[in-house]
Amino acid sequence: MAINVGDKAPDFELENQFGQKVKLSDFRDKKNVVLIFFPKAFTGICTGELCAIRDDKSDFASDDVVTFGISCDSSATLKAFSEQQSFDYDLLSDWWPHGETGRAYGVFLEDKGFNTRGTFIIDKAGKVAWTVVNAPGDARSNDDYRSALAQLV
């Protein structure tokens, strides 16, 4: 099922790399949320994309914006990945039930067992304000979602 601009964002509760629960609806009326679904930790394109978010921190973390990376990797794997790359934002594990959040957002690839590259900007009202979905081998542009965020904050 595809998620479109204007749709209510599916709520979820996932563990971050430290084993803490993160619930999307906890940010409603408080922050815009950037969800960055990615296939696998420690892979080239994923590492490059997530490091670009880290390096452009001021655009993706503020009083009005919080960013989460989401993959089907375990919390332990995401913790090691985050430590290796010095990420200063949470990575969320869609490990179990395997890919459930990715399915809700229409980015889980059943035949591969992981999420493709999907980015969703959720506004403070809990609605999808912007989205892009790319194939696993196609990197996304930070400039595109930086522009979309600028319209919200």
Image (cartoon, rainbow, N blue to C red):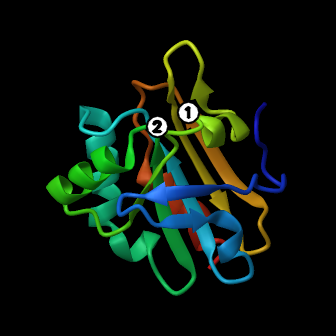
The residue positioned 36% from the left and 34% from the top of the image is 40
Q: Residue 4 or 15: which is nearer the viewer?
A: 15
Farthest right residue in view: 7
Please report the residue visible at 35 percent of the width from the left and 63 percent of the height from the top.
18
Image position of 59 (left or right of 147)? left
The image quadrant where one finds the C terminus is bottom right
Furthest residue in direction bottom, as rendered: 63
Q: Quadrant of the N terminus?
A: top right
Element marked by disc 1: loop
**Drawn side of residue 74 relative to residue 121, left or right:** left
Res 98 label: 1
Q: Amino acid at mark 2?
A: Cys
Closest to the observer, 139 or 144: 139
Q: Where is 102 relative to 8, above or below?
A: above
Q: Residue at x 43, y 54 (%)?
A: 142
Provide the secondary structure element on which disc 2 rests.
loop
Image depth: mark 1 or mark 2 in front: 1
Image side of residue 151 versus residue 145, left or right? right
Residue 17: mark in rendering = none
Q: Residue at x 38, y 42 (%)?
A: 74
Q: Decide: marks 1, 2 in contact (CB < 8 A)?
A: yes
Residue underneath mark 2: 72
Residue 5 % position (x, y): 78, 50
* Label 1 neighbour load within 10 Å: few <14, some 14-19, many 20+: some
